[in-house]
Image (spheres, coloured by chain):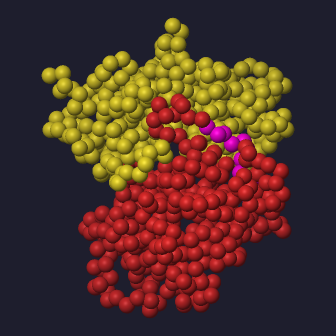
Amino acid sequence: MAEDKAILEVKNLKTYFKTDSGIVKAVDGVNFTLKRGETLGIVGESGSGKSVTNLSVMKLIPSPPGKIVDGEVLLHGRNILSLNNRELSKIRGNKISMIFQDPMTSLNPFLKISTQMIETIMLHQKLGKDEAWDRAVEMLRLVGIPAPEKRIDAYPHQFSGGMRQRVMIAMALSCNPEILIADEPTTALDVTIQAQILELIKDLSDKMGTAVIMITHDLGVVAGMCDHVCVMYAGRIVEKAKTDDLFADPRHPYTVGLINSVPRLDQGKEEALYSIKGQPPNLIDLPDCCPFHPRCDRAKDICRSQYPPEKVLGSERFVRCWLYEEEKN
Amino acid sequence: MSKTSIQQEVLLEVRDLKQHFPIRHSQNVIRAVDGVSFSLRKGETLGLVGESGCGKSTTARAINYLYTPTSGDIILDGVNLSSLSRREMAAARKDMQMVFQDPYASLNPRMTVNQIILEPLRINKNRGVISMTNGEMDKRVEELMEIVGLSRNLKNRFPHEFSGGQRQRIGIARALALNPKLILLDEPVSALDVSIQSQVLNLLTKLQKEFGLTYLFIAHDLAVVKYISDRVAVMYLGKLVEVSPSEELYDRPLHPYTQALLSAVPIPDPEVEKSRQRIILEGDVPSPDRIQKGCYFCDRCPKVMDKCRSSIPELKDRGEDHQVACWLYE
């Protein structure tokens, strides 16, 4: 089946940042694959390495201080990380595009929307200016901008937050990318606008067959959008599963805690909300043990001394936790 | 059964509050808050929800007289704040404190935790509102740190040495310092990660029980508001559209805007998400600089009628303590 072919494989990706107080292991051995047409969710709290993982995939890590120290990112079997800038620019925005959290800072405030969109389209699609213009108008219409042939000549500040994010999506999809990386695309937006934008991304990715990597901290967004989910903690994926399985039967104590600590709209009031004790670890000089053990209710001796390996649980599911290693023995 | 009943004593009453801001080189004004009335009962939590720009934070700031309201009355514990002199205002303000959204911006980076929590005590002592010796004040700071779950050994540290959740605890300790009756919480957990958010929510619930506090809890996250509030007020474009006991509002939303808002919130359960019907609103919130002739929501309302465009519906009681401003129910 064509859908089952992996288009993107990330293998043992490690991205470190050098700081004055030590080396920050922002991403420390991340593996995942993305299939055609799939929507993959990456959830985690601030500093868990979600965004750095995806910037690394595009080789957009500012260096120095950052450095991709190990790993491979294979797009159709070709390692992106070994490409030079010229080759990379053929992939960025063309094969893989990205939309960011804040649509105001990711559009150039000095340039008309038309200038910014036509530039991208002409660069990647080898179209003339007039054809690129038509394509841009068509894309804006597709994302639901009213009167696109007029609005295309507006500046970013003349659009509202939700409209700007629509423009970003139009730009990102204008070259028919195979992969769309959406980094917290709705965090800056209100819920009613968020619903519009999520619906739009879902619709367009279905229509155009684009695979989506959805980075978010909102478990609700994951539940509604994604086929598979990776849960990240302290630079690694601690659990990966199909969305339904993850919510029905979370395995890693962190995932369990995360799901339980969110108040839910469709449930009555409980007495006290579950909360994970303590705070996320400092990523500088992280010891080589399970980084979650100080906050874990079920921590054992081995958790304090060794990092748990990936334990495969059924198809398309793994967890990094010592609790599941011993079950076998 | 909610822990407050309708008969309960009112601590704060807001009557037809308006807060307009002038626009430079223009005759128009921004009508950030455009006629809001509600009351807050002793010991309850009233959630104030709405999207960005709807006037939630402005309402809180106007209540606290951080802005001077354009018109309307704020009555705290029977005293109308607009009638007070500067000196009397200082004393009255002691009873209401604020906790802000951004724990990075709301603490002075050059002050230690000790100085930050001490400041309200020091200022009110200088004004002669409270009388405390220096020793008593130091003891109070340590006590407050313990109350919010911070070790007293940390009192000489600076804000940058703390995480977001801990900073929010410092902000809460500062708000508690003067034993206020009312705390205005302006998006107190929006900037925090989920695992930390639930810690702070639990702390707020515990403090309310312990000290009999009354909260005005502003947030845009409807699930959080449902969890913490006894009653919820929904705001749109500077006006309240619906006020109701929390369970009642979520079970039986009356206003089309509330219905759309609730249906837009993603629920962290894929099974539930698959079967949900979303009401997707068209368009964006209009600019608050024009005078509305009809219902403020009429441009986006899926159930709009002719009447909605020509006259403004009032907030009226529909039984069970449930108020709504909508022509559908007239």
Q: Main secondary structure of the magenta part?
A: loop
Q: Position of residue A36 (x, y in %)?
A: 54, 17
Whether residue B192 is situated above or below residue A91 in the rendered picture: below
Question: What are the residue bounds of the magenta stretch?
Answer: B278-288
Q: Report whether B43 appears left or right of B50.
A: left
Q: In the image, which lettered chain appears yellow?
A: A
**Which of the 4 quarters of the picture holds residue B140?**
bottom left
Q: Position of residue B87 (x, y in %)?
A: 54, 90
**Which of the 4 quarters of the picture holds residue B162?**
bottom left
Q: Nearer the viewer, residue B251 or A55?
A: B251
Residue at the image point whose x is 44% and y is 89% from the top: B129
Residue at the image point whose x is 44% and y is 21% from the top: A33
Quadrant for the C terminus of chain A, please: top left
Q: Position of residue A23 (x, y in %)?
A: 34, 42
Whether residue B96 is situated above or below residue B36 in the rendered picture: below
Q: In the image, which lettered chain appears red?
A: B
Q: Nearer the viewer, residue A39 or A52?
A: A39
**Which of the 4 quarters of the picture holds residue B138?**
bottom left
- State yes or no: residue A215 in magenta: no
Q: Position of residue A46 (x, y in %)?
A: 43, 45
